[in-house]
């Protein structure tokens, strides 16, 4: 039944019955977008955490230098295509972007000199790198948002996750980031860790609230089949929390953040009122730079190669995506609706302005059904997901991760240039 869920969702949201096919193909990008959002992937880490599914490798100075040059070459290809386009946002993810701050600062300097940077700049920061000097350097270079990848303030849970610091260091790193004066400092936590209790979830969220973080992100631990973490847990005969336990942990996170005055701004995020959100995944369109980065522009969704050596090599000859799939209007609308669901609010008037058409009949029916079931409420032009609806989307997001991302990323990790991926 689990494998049918993504197909049912695809039919309900987009009206499509067939799969998405990713394969090497020519891609035609818009000739002159009004603006773009950039995501830049920096894969280098001090050590490789066993639970992390993203493309990463142990830091090497020579490779890092070559990689930085490859990033600039990829950016130059877009500069040649679009000229001095406006950049609405830039986010550096990884990997550990704060391990190579020189790439962040020099890449930002290039963007400012060749594009028109007019929005937020976000960087993921590892607690071990969060020194006052690094934070000041990032802020001086134009970074306005940081996300501290703390995962937990509990030493026992940090050990299970294989993190290379303790809770004392994590707390000090958060304090320094919050004192540095960024527009938003996000504290990134994980729940549903094997053996974790509801009270441990509450303690993590409560401490982040007490610190005064502008945003708190609390993601469920999603175990990918190809990761060392799953094999480690299997050998130790430690199971992931069941759905009931995970649901109780999520409810505890929501309750604790709400009691502290935070607003739920996404399925797994909580913000202070009026705080600027740290969000990389909910943009309507974006350009991905770097190994494994994806791009959603015009009629295509593309993915770069997952191989760092191949990414660097092909940068010299003119980069091309490893895989691409062509999107029709229904696909693009479904993608937009998916991430608006993640944001807990679907503005139908905005949908009309973007796609120049009203809400499709089957989507109207779906939203009406959600309202009838108490999963959504309708106010003006907007459907808001209730707590019940948010939990439903929590389940959908997890299934999307396994059905789409795990399969696509798994294929990319096996082969630098896959010939075909059907999902």
Image (cartoon, rainbow, N blue to C red):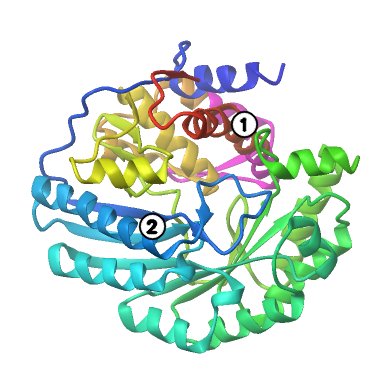
* Of residues 24 and 121, the one drawn nearer to the viewer in this rendering: 24
Q: Give the residue pinned by disc 1.
A: 402
Residue shown at the point (51%, 17%) measured from the top left: 11
- Please identify the residue farthest to the right as the structure is shown: 237
Place of residue 63 in the rendered image (x, y in percent of width and height, measured from the top left): 38, 57
Place of residue 168 in the rendered image (x, y in percent of width and height, measured from the top left): 75, 81
Q: Earlier in the sequence, mark 1 or mark 2?
A: 2
Q: Quadrant of residue 241?
A: top right
Q: Is residue 386 visible?
A: yes
Residue shown at the point (66%, 41%) measured from the top left: 394
Place of residue 227 in the rendered image (x, y in percent of width and height, measured from the top left): 66, 40
Q: Secondary structure at mark 2?
A: helix
From which residue to which does the magenta span run? 366-394
Q: Quadrant of residue 196?
A: bottom right
- Please name which of the two marks, 1 or 2, marks the residue nearer to the observer: 2
Question: Neighbour class for label 2 at 10 Å: few (<14), some, many (≥20)?
Answer: some
Place of residue 256 in the rendered image (x, y in percent of width and height, measured from the top left): 76, 66
Residue shown at the point (62%, 80%) measured from the top left: 173
* Of residues 130 and 318, the one drawn nearer to the viewer in this rendering: 318
Q: Give the residue pinned by disc 2.
A: 63
Asked if residue 218 lies left or right of residue 319, the reply is: right
Residue 382: say if magenta: yes
Asked if residue 422 lies left or right of residue 118, the reply is: right
Residue 192: give its label: none
* Of residues 305 and 123, the one drawn nearer to the viewer in this rendering: 305
């Amino acid at each position: 039944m689990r494998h049918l869920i993504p197909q049912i969702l695809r039919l309900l949201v987009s009206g499509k019955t067939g799969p998405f096919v990713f394969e090497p193909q020519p891609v035609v990008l818009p000739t002159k977008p009004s603006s773009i959002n950039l995501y830049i992937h920096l894969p280098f880490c001090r050590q490789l955490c066993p639970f992390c599914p993203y493309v990463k490798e142990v830091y090497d100075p020579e490779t890092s230098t070559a990689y930085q040059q490859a990033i600039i070459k990829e950016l130059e290809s877009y500069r040649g295509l679009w000229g001095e386009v406006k950049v609405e946002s830039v986010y550096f993810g990884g990997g550990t972007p704060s391990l190579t701050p020189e790439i962040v600062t020099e890449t930002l300097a290039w963007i400012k000199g060749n594009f028109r940077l007019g929005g937020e700049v976000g960087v993921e920061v590892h607690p071990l790198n969060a020194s006052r000097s690094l934070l000041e350097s990032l802020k001086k270079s134009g970074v306005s948002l940081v996300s501290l990848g703390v995962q937990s303030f509990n030493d026992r849970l940090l050990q299970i996750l294989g993190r290379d610091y303790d809770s004392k260091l994590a707390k000090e790193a958060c304090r320094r980031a919050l004192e540095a004066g960024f527009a938003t400092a996000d504290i990134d936590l994980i729940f549903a860790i094997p053996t974790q209790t509801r009270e441990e979830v509450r303690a993590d969220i409560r401490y982040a609230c007490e610190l005064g973080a502008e945003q708190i992100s609390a993601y469920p631990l999603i175990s990918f089949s190809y990761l060392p973490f799953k094999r480690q847990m299997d050998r130790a005969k430690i199971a992931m929390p069941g759905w009931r336990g995970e649901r109780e942990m999520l409810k505890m996170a929501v309750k604790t953040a709400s009691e502290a005055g935070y607003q739920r701004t996404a399925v797994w995020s909580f913000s202070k009122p009026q705080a600027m959100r740290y969000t990389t995944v909910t943009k309507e369109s974006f350009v991905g730079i770097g190994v494994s980065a994806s791009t959603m522009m015009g009629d295509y969704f593309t993915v770069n190669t997952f191989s760092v050596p191949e990414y660097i090599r092909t940068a010299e000859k003119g980069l091309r995506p490893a895989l691409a799939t062509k999107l029709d209007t229904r696909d693009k609308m479904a993608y937009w609706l998916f991430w608006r669901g993640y944001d807990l609010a679907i503005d139908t008037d905005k949908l009309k302005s973007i796609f120049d058409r009203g809400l499709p009949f089957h989507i109207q029916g779906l939203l009406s059904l959600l309202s009838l079931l108490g999963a959504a409420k309708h106010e003006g032009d907007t459907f808001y997901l209730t707590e019940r609806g948010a939990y439903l989307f929590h389940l959908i997001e997890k299934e999307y991760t396994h059905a789409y991302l795990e399969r696509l990323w798994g294929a990319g990790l096996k082969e630098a240039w896959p010939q075909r991926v059907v999902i």
